[in-house]
Amino acid sequence: MNDWQLVAAWTQGEEQAFEILVRKYFPIVYSAAVRQLGDAHSAQDVAQSVFIVFARKAPKLSHDVALTGWFLRTTRFVVRDVLKQMNRRIHREQTAGALAALEQTAGWEPDWANAARFVDEALLALSAGEQACVVARVLEERSFREIGQSLQIGEDAAQKRVSRGLEKMRHFLQKRGVKVGAVAIPAILGANLAATAGPAMLGTAWTGVQAALQGNAAGTTGLALAEQFIKTMALRQLIRLSSLVTLGVLLLGGGALLALNGTRGPPAFRVSDPRLETLGRAWAAVVQRAAILAGFPQGGPPAGDPNRAAYDQARTFVLSETTRVSTELDQVVTASREREQVAEFLTVELRETLGLDERQQAAVRAQLREKLSQGPTFKDGLRALYNSKAAFATALRQSLSAEQLRRYDQSYRADGIGLLAFVALQLAEQ
């Protein structure tokens, strides 16, 4: 049986089907957790929690979802929760001591240890096709012929996708100051797989998951992590759903007083990190889809209405992209530059949504940065930006051309209800 047949069998009461899935994917999940945490004991708790989450979510997952990618993303999210509890941030300045166990166990050189922290992020940054091929080749140890057959592509195409994916991962790591060759990346990804394939560790993992599913694992770290993850994701979804249902679009955000018509403006706007450019563009797409939702009645068209599919598609896109963009932006910003970086991110969103020219971009970025700089904490800056919404919206509209005003009304509505929604979401989640 394939993975989804196993899921179906498990939902019908065949416990052995779920055990097969745990034994198949546990090595991948555990090794990813070890790379990111640098601690085998904590990684085992994380892996157990991921499968508890999977047990609760699997019946509702779309069959279009690639399970390996789902497990890697969920592992990444749970690890982030663990690191937050330990008061650590996920960025390149993490302490080298957190990876000491990996260096001693595998005998890796320093750059290999540094690469372990970012290699999963690099893998998840690949396109869906490249990611599927790299995962199948490196983590599932399948031949190029098998990969081609499963993805309905040629054997040569599968090999090229793997090579291209590994090279992109090498560039991804290089941008984070980590120098390793593309040939080293498979070794880094597969370093802990063999250690997790033994019957003792797999048996322990399955026993822990089984106990949690039967309600006999109260107080365990794995169950606590799983429940915390599910609670966090449910809270985020509730915030976004309530925003869509109540307002028709995402929660309204704040603004700042802009002087967009002066003869001498601030320096030209340039994005300091290409990832902020990518995420800002992605968020602009979310804003535009949210505007589509605003055109539907509350709760969307009734079942059977020909527009229901468009509504459901837009809502799904907004919810999933909001989570993804928020998560990835959190990984990009650093404590020393978060106000500047968020100002850049929001400027890119407004530029893409409204078609701002260079002068307008520079003025918007300067005023966003000025408001975000207020207060001793970043949250104080977000609140200052939120509280000055009316002045920001008024001045921004006055600076726009007729075509830009049309785009503004289409995306944010004339009353600016969807303007700077990301700010309000951040305040709601903190």
Image (cartoon, rainbow, N blue to C red):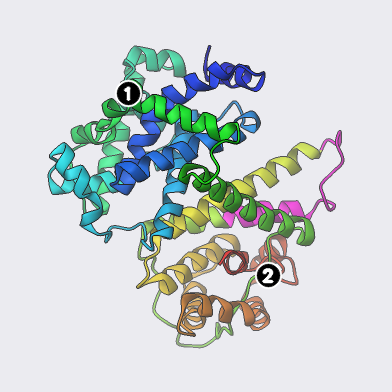
**Residue located 27% across and 61% down the image:** 93
Q: Are marks 1 and 2 in contact (CB under 8 Å)?
A: no
Residue 29: in magenta span: no
- What x and y, as percent, mark residue 123? 36, 39
Magenta segment: 284-306
Q: Nearer the viewer, residue 154 or 376?
A: 376
Asked if residue 6 is positioned above or below residue 424 in the image, the reply reads above
Disc 1 is placed on an element classified as loop
Please tell me in which quadrant of the rendered image residue 317 appears.
top right
- Within 10 Å of disc 1 (Cα), the crowding (few <14, some 14-19, many 20+) is some
Q: Is residue 84 visible?
A: yes
Please tell me in which quadrant of the rendered image residue 330 appears.
bottom left
Q: Nearer the viewer, residue 168 or 187?
A: 187
- What x and y, as percent, mark residue 44? 38, 39
Disc ID at residue 197: 1
Is 43 on the left-hand or right-hand side of 245? left
* Amino acid type, residue under disc 2 in the picture: Ala
**Residue beneath disc 2:** 402
Which is in the foreground here, disc 1 or disc 2?
A: 1
* Amino acid type, residue under disc 1 in the picture: Ala
Asked if residue 251 is positioned above or below residue 203 in the image, the reply reads below
Is 135 on the left-hand or right-hand side of 368? left
Q: Is residue 112 visible?
A: no
Disc 2 is placed on an element classified as helix
**CA separation, marks 1 and 2?**
63 Å
Q: Quadrant of the C terminus?
A: bottom right
Asked if residue 63 is positioned above or below residue 74 in the image, the reply reads above
Q: Nearer the viewer, residue 14 or 4?
A: 14
